[in-house]
Every structure is written in C-alpha cells, then in structure tokens.
Amino acid sequence: MSSDNGSPPDIRLYSTVSGLGQSPTLAINEASNALVADGRDIIKFGLGQSPFPVPESVVASLRAHAREKDYLPVKGLPALCSAVADFHEREHGLRFRSDDILIGPGSKELLFLLQLVSDTELMIPRPGWVSYAPQAKIVGRPVRWIHTRSKDDWMLTPEFLEEALESSEGSRSVLLNYPSNPTGRTFDELTLRAFADLARKHRILLISDEIYADLHHEGKHRSVAEFYPEGTIVSAGLSKWCGAGGWRLGTFAFPPSLQWLLDAMAAVASETFTSTSAPIQYAAITAFERGPDIQEYLKLSQRFLAALGNHIAGVFRESKVRVPDPEGGFYLFIEFNSHRSALNKIGITDSNELAEHLLRDTGVAMLPGVAFGCPADELVLRLSYVDFDGALALQEVAKVSDEEPLSEILLQRVSPRVLDGVGRVSRWLKGLNAVNEREGSRLEVRAI
C-alpha cells in the first residue's frame, strides 16, 4: 500500500448536520462510563434506560425464534401488527386495525422517518425529549418551541397550545410526550380533551409519544387518540415498559385517514433499514399479548417506581429544591432556582455549569435542562432514577402486600446507589449554603 499522503476527498458535511453533537443522553452515559473506568464512583442519573429485566416469557419467545432469518415485510410481521392493534384496544381503548400499524427498529427511528416524509413545522412543548429537535434539524424541518411554566410543572397547558397555534399557520404537527421525559408528569382527561379540540379546530397532526404509557404509576394512562382519533399517531415500543431498550423495536399506530403517511414512511424504510429484526418481532408478539406474568411484572414495576420517585422528591424538597410529583416513568425534573444566589457565587449561572459542577464535586451525573430545550439560565436538571437492580426490585416488591406501602428500608436495600446519589446532592447543597451563610455573617460583622 502506498504511503503517499495525497489530498483528502473533496467532500463536505451537509449543512443540516454541521455542528450536531451526540445525543446528550448517550453522551452523558459514555462520559459516566469513562469516569468509572478511571476509578471514579459515579452515580448514573443520565441515561433513561429501564433497569428491569425483560420478562422471562418474552426472553423465552426470543430464544424460540432465534433461527428466524428471513426478511420480514417492511411494515412489520403481520401477526405482530395484529398483536399491537389488539394491545392498544385492550389496554387503552384505542381502535386500530393491523393495517394501521408500522413496526420499526425503535420508536426513535420511526419519529425520524415521520419528520423526513411529512412537510410540516414541528411544535414541541418546552422542555422536550433531547432528540426531537435535532431530528428536525437533520431533515431541515422548522421547529417551534411551545412555552410552559414552572408553576404548571413544566407541562403544556391548553392556553399555551392555543397561543402557539393562533400565532402560527400552515401545516403543523405537535409532539406530545406523556408521561413526560423529562418531567415525570402526565396529562389528565380534561387537558387531553382540550388538546383534541384545538387540534381539530386547527387541523393539526398530533404525534403522541406514549413510550412511558405503561409505566404510569397508577396504571391509568389515557391517550389523546381517544379524543382526536382522526389526527393522532400513537408512538410506543418495548424499550421502557418491557426493559428492552437494546432490542430496538418501536411501533406507530395511524388513523386510517393517514394511511398515505404510513405508506410513505414504509417506502423510505424499504430503502433504508428494510425491516426490523425478525427474532425480535416474533418475541414482541408475546410482549404485546400481555399474559398474566407480564401484567404482574408491570404492576410491580409501577409500584416500585412510584415509591422511589416520591421518596426522592421528598428528600430534595427538604433541601428547598422544587420537584414536581412524578406520575409515570422514572424521571424527576429538579429546579435549583431557589439556590441561585449561592450557586452564582461559585460561578454557576446556567444548567450546563450546574451539571458539570455536580459531576465533578459529587460524582452524580444528571442532564442539564438546556438539553431539553430550556433556556440555559434556568437552573434545572433531569434525574433518571434507574441506577438500581431491577430484578431485585421485582422480587422485593412481590413480598409486600398491595395494601402495605413500600418502606424506606426496602428502597434502601434495592436502590442504595440512587439514595446515595440523592444524598450526595443534598449534602452538596447544604455545604454550599453553609459556606455562603458564614461568609455573609463575616461581611455583616465587618460592616458593623
């Protein structure tokens, strides 16, 4: 081989990906792993990966279909599409046909394809999941952030949706995610009905990202598609409720009136990923059929996440940090604004600096609010409370009667690293404020 160092190929980066970094959730996980490899004790609250094991019946189904090697239909294995349609009707009262379902290698890929084929302005409530806006940027779609407020727990209200719709025009799609990543909050029926009325009035597309629907802490998720069936696409998958993020299987459910959009996405899929992994699709049938073992698995998961999330929120509130009560998933959106003065004195003025200081000083990795579209000077961080043994959690919760609350002792036994991480942040805040109080006292003495 020639060692001549000639000129590199004449090729340039496409403008829509220029300056695009790695997804913040994946970046924080890799950074955390690198610190662990260097010997640091890092509590990983960055990546939202379910700690629960894939249910054994689903694993057994994957094992049984491991020899499935043929390409499957682009839109998905017919038996799986039928199982997904039945699942939506049985669990959430949504009427879909098997022909309304599209299977992809993760709902993330399906969301990207939807943005690629639909010529609309994407409207995202702020804060929103870290990949929504970058995906739109990649395909050159305009993004409009919709305002939310701390006093509403950072969740979209009908008033702010109406304001955004009235001040825009043309083809628009609104992306709703609930239970929410990053807030852990969800919408009630009254709010969903109001969203549906506005969507119908303005003839907009609703993309309802319900990947955490079955981790609603009370098992009472409601979909906006109940109230706006003609214009809602429901996004779901295996990653969160089934603990199978690495399996990469997502689902989209379309109203019949948007069959042309499904077909367009399938056409692009046929030229890109061809079809989703065959063994995974066969195993997913078992997951979506939801036998008694999976129903029990979900009940135990929901119960543990609710107890742990509420306990963490309570600990933070003792440190005068505002945290909305979690209602689903495994996230908390934590506001440090009440400590702004003390934080400013050590050079922390935005959420990036706050996350960096906490990682350096305490070994706790969290994501800054700016990664979710929040203004940089909002001192908010997202905490993903998943650094625990999910299999042990299921075993321990199963021993406690439904009428008995899960004790702090049980939470400590199952999730010591989570509670350790929360304790580290609380002690850091306490120490920070103590130093500032002492300095303030000295200044007062000098003034006298």
Image (cartoon, grey):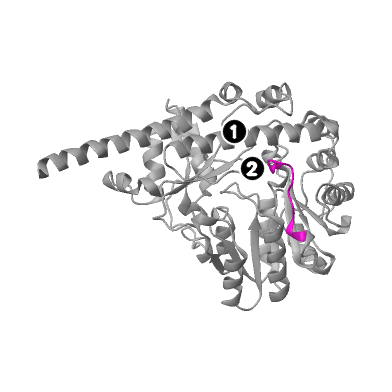
Whichever of callouts 2 and 1 sits on the residue coming sooner in the sequence is: 1
Residue 197: x and y in percent read: 72, 69
Give the dominant element type of the magenta stretch: helix, strand or loop: loop
Read off the residue under disc 1. Answer: 308
Residue 247 seen anywhere in this rendered image of the structure: yes
Q: Quadrant of residue 163?
A: bottom right
> Which segment is the magenta one?
215-225
Q: Position of residue 410 (x, y in %)?
A: 61, 22
Tell which of 277 and 376 is nearer to you: 376
Relative to residue 441, is residue 295 drawn left or right?
Answer: right
Task: Please give the name of the residue rendered at 49% of the width and 31% of the height, measured from the top-left corner.
Answer: 43
User: Which numbered dot is residue 424?
Assistant: none
Residue shown at the point (66%, 64%) measured from the top left: 116
x and y percentages locating residue 369 in the rendered image: 47, 51
Q: Looking at the image, can residue 33 be seen?
A: no
As displayed, is residue 52 above or below residue 129? above
Residues under labels 2 and 1: Cα distance?
11 Å
- Using the rendered view, name the quadrant where residue 271 is placed: bottom right
Which amino acid is tagged 2? Gly
Q: Which residue is mark 2?
A: 329
Q: Residues within 10 Å of mark 2 (few under 14, many from 20)?
A: many
Please report contact status of discs 2 and 1: CB closer than 8 Å, yes or no: no
Where disc 1 sits, the SS reads: helix
Q: Could you tell me which residue is drawn at 68 percent across and 71 percent down?
A: 198
Horizontal and vertical percent position of residue 233: 75, 60
Is the C terminus in the top left, top right, bottom left or bottom right quadrant? top left
**Of helix, strand and loop, which one carries label 2?**
loop
Quarter assignment of residue 269: bottom right
The outermost residue toward the front is 448
